[in-house]
Image (tube, rainbow, N blue to C red):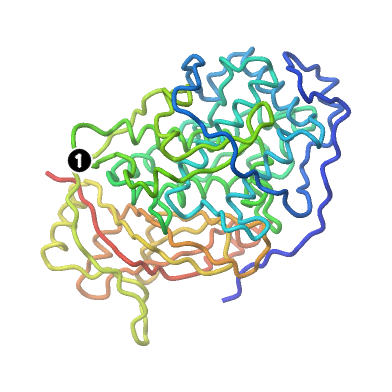
Amino acid sequence: MKFDSISILNRRRFLQGAASLAGGAVLATSSSTLTALTAFAQDPPSGCPAPPTGGTHFVPGSDTRPIVLRKSISALSAAELTKLQSAYAALRALPASDKRTWVLQADMHALFCDSCNNLNTDIHGSWSFFPWHRGYLYYYERILGKLVGDMDHFRLPYWDWENIRTLPTPYRSPGSSGNSLWDNKRRPGLAGGGNLPVADGTTARITTLYGLTDFDSFGGDASGGGAVEANPHGTIHVDVGQAANPFEDMGNLGYAARDPLFFAHHGNIDKLWSGWNDLASGAGTSYKNPTSSTFLNLRWSFYDENQNVVSISAADVLDHKDNLRYIYKSPRFVIPPLWLILQCELICCLPDPDPGPWLRVTEQVRETVIQTARASSPVVLVLRGVTLPSGISGNFDVFATRGERRILVGSIGVIAHGDRKEQHAHKPVTLVLDITEAAPDLFLKDKPATLHAYRRIEDQKPGITAKAQKLEEVFQLKAERAEIRVAKR
């Protein structure tokens, strides 16, 4: 199998806008000023900056600003939207010497999420994913607040893609450098007002994820990513980013934060984590974050609104209400009250003829699963430690396949890496697949359905109609552990 390679392209540094707003606050920005800022750092720079290290430690309780609701973009008032646009215009206009500048702040994501400069700092594919991004958004939000003179009340909005299935209008219209929220490296379909793929980031997907009560499956552990990271986080990154080489901006970890929509997307990811925590009650570990000192002591450095180096730990960001001074509305999803966990094995790579990865279970488990599926009660397959082939990127759909019959059970979003390594090794991931519809085929005693990952049609050859293409099988699923979860009766 030949995978797409990512060629190395020459890059040029961001040419700064005429306006210099290094230390001041911007309360309003005229359309003429915005139009003048034609160099919006759409092209990534060559190389990477030195990462901030050390710095003043965050002290819980030191942020005494009012606790403010982070809103959906669609809920912003006209004044709030103007303030958001002004904040991004001011950020883009900062001189290169400023530690808050657009390019450097975007490169923070490359430094920590793409192992830029060969640093061993990749926080993707582990339990660092949620807390690092929360800290990143916190200081980014403070920088924007300082630039518009409203540290107390400015908060980043989120794109609630489970409800708003198109790119938020303020981020795509007008589609020019006169709009500080616009980015010219998005997929034309979405950029033109099209909808997200029907299976990505849906309420049904979030409900399935909220059925996971353990953080390892939901958010990852020390050596592997959680289910949220692969889908919907990864799938929507890929949906927005360009479908073809070089996959910029949202489609590439090295450059994703150059699109303002990145922060709205990750605001919603952060909201999912917050909502998941809200489901915790009483004793036990259900819906609770890790308590390991190894996790709690994770620490990262950033630049704050005054250009100072600061550091914040995983423990510091867990209470975003009291420590970081923002809240979300409570989620409204139907959560399965209790799960019955059934053991199974994902058997792969049998001698020829190999039908593909299939599930081996006891007779009792088979009967339980089939009865549950027939009652239209959810059946979820959790695969931990799934290995992805090196060098792949894009969106992949997982099908239960039996002969010519294929049933979609889930998707995987694999974001390209800015390091341009053709054979970049991916960390193990957790996949949560909804196999309710496919259960009768997957648990047949004779020639059961098998699990295969196919590259999405639109990601195979952009510009070619779906009718002219065929599903391209990319890999078979291999997992360290597998379990089936059904709702208890």
Q: Is residue 419 left or right of residue 349?
A: right
Return the residue nearer the eye: 315 or 107: 315
Does residue 129 appear in this view?
yes
Q: Quadrant of the C terminus?
A: top left
Where does residue 202 sit, x and y in percent of width and height?
43, 40
- Above or below, 307 relative to 489: above
- The crowd level at tag 1 (other Cα within 10 Å; few <14, some 14-19, many 20+) is few
Q: Is residue 22 left or right of residue 348?
A: right
- Above or below, 296 relative to 142: below
Quadrant in the rendering for residue 2: bottom right
Return the residue nearer the eye: 357 or 25: 25
Residue beneath the point at 31% across and 43% down? 291
Q: Is residue 242 left or right of residue 44?
A: left
Quadrant in the rendering for residue 381: bottom left
- Above or below, 154 relative to 435: above
Q: Quadrant of the N terminus?
A: bottom right
Does residue 328 appear in this view?
no
Where does residue 262 sit, x and y in percent of width and height?
60, 39
Residue beneath the point at 14% across and 68% down? 362
- Secondary element at image label 1: loop
Return the residue nearer the eye: 178 or 42: 42
Residue beneath the point at 37% across and 40% down? 204
Q: Amino acid type of disc 1?
A: Gly
- The residue wearing badge 1 is 284
Q: How many marks?
A: 1
